[in-house]
Image (cartoon, rainbow, N blue to C red):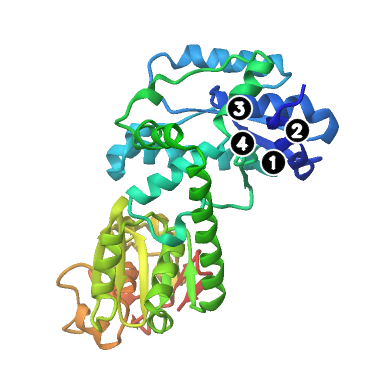
Amino acid sequence: MSLSFDNKLFSKLYNFANKRLIVAYSGGKDSTALLHYLAVKRHLFNYSLFPVYINHNLRKDIEQEIKKCSAFCEQLGLDLIIYNIDVYKLVNNEKMSIEEAARKLRYAELFRALENFNCDYILLAHTYNDLIENFFIKIMRGTSIFSLKGFNASPVLKRPLLDISTEEVIEYNNAYYLEYIFDESNNDDRFLRNWVRHNIVAKILEKNRSFLKNISYIQEESKLISDYISKKIDVDYLALKDYIRINKKDFLKLEKVERLFFLSRVMPIQISRSIIDEINKIIDLKNSKRLSLPNNYIFEVTYDNIYIFKKDLIKAFKIIKGKGSDCIKIEHLRKIVFFDDTLSKEVLSIRNRKKGDRLNRKKLKDIFIDKKIDLFKRDTSIIVERNNNIVYVEHIYKDKNYSIKVYNEDERLCVS
């Protein structure tokens, strides 16, 4: 039996020889074909397979589906690994779409599985058709020209079916009489991917399927342009878990197209062209300015830097340190505050700044401004109070009678 599915996929398996592989398995036609093929060929390449099913908890009939997936894995001599996620909770908490929330949580669980099972790669069953659909989805969401190529990249994420079409997947499944699950939600055009599949890609296939190849050329050109510009850009920036700090002076030296490219690369979320236009309006300002972004992110232009961060980082907080403790950890800021022997024996208040704060009769806000402390740093600076008196303000003040140090876990800095 000669199948194009086999011809295209076999040579890629050499990259997985002797590796431990997480396989994202949903029971659908694409992941069923991929998992079956990998299982059939594993004796040739000596890799280990760990099929992972992500239960989105979006449908009532999911238990029956999970049973079918488990039975299929058992036939292949594999154990199905199941992770549960709460999509609606994330939708409500971060005001994002069901699609976006499901994708975010799904990838988080796959990476957790990668670590839990000490695996080398995560294999995803995205096909050539998914690649084309992704192109139109990005266009409709207003992505930049630099991001039209393919899916988000990661060294451990592998998509071996990207040059294999839906028709070739179906041919493979039929040849081996493989049953797969059809998700009824795939018919629901309220989901953007389904609408694109049914109303754009399907119409192109009806008209002339060679048009899809032209779209592939545009995606390739997008990658070529991106690779070229990336070699020309030199911007000092720091990307951490919850925020990104960019050297403002370096950024302002960039040409307009280079700025657009750089932002498209460092942004933790996908942003529309309208947001880019808003950023361009404030980017040259000398005073501090903030712009709200989707998913509770904030874009900030301040004295020397540009920040992109989660809104939760600047929320008001107050922690009471009891007697006998020589340190306090501020979880959401990933900072640890250390106290000397005298202060460790006392009850202290640890917080960030609030309206009306004063230090030696001068407004704390004015002191921050005089010292040209970035707005983000002002709102995340640690303040320590003893008997309602401020004895420490991170970056600008410390009472000479006490020793307080702040350790920043992300930046590996200890500030006296």
Which residue is label 4 attached to? 164
Q: Distance between the residues labelled 2 and 1?
A: 9 Å
In the image, residue 376 above or below residue 275: below
Identify the mark nearer the N-term, 4 or 2.
2
Between marks 4 and 1 in the image, the one whose residue lies nearer the viewer:
4
Q: Distance between the residues labelled 4 and 3?
A: 7 Å
Which residue is label 2 attached to? 48
Examine the rendering and report whether any part of residue 286 can be seen. yes
Identify the mark nearer the N-term, 4 or 1.
1
Q: In this orientation, which residue lies closer to the viewer: 223 or 31?
A: 223
Find residue 145 and report its image quarter.
bottom left
Which residue is label 1 attached to? 119
Q: Looking at the image, which residue is at 76% across and 26% down? A: 2
| Proximity of marks 2 and 1: CB atoms separated by less than 8 Å | yes
In the image, residue 30 above or below residue 341: above
| Proximity of marks 4 and 3: CB atoms separated by less than 8 Å | yes
Q: Under tag 4, what secondary structure?
A: loop
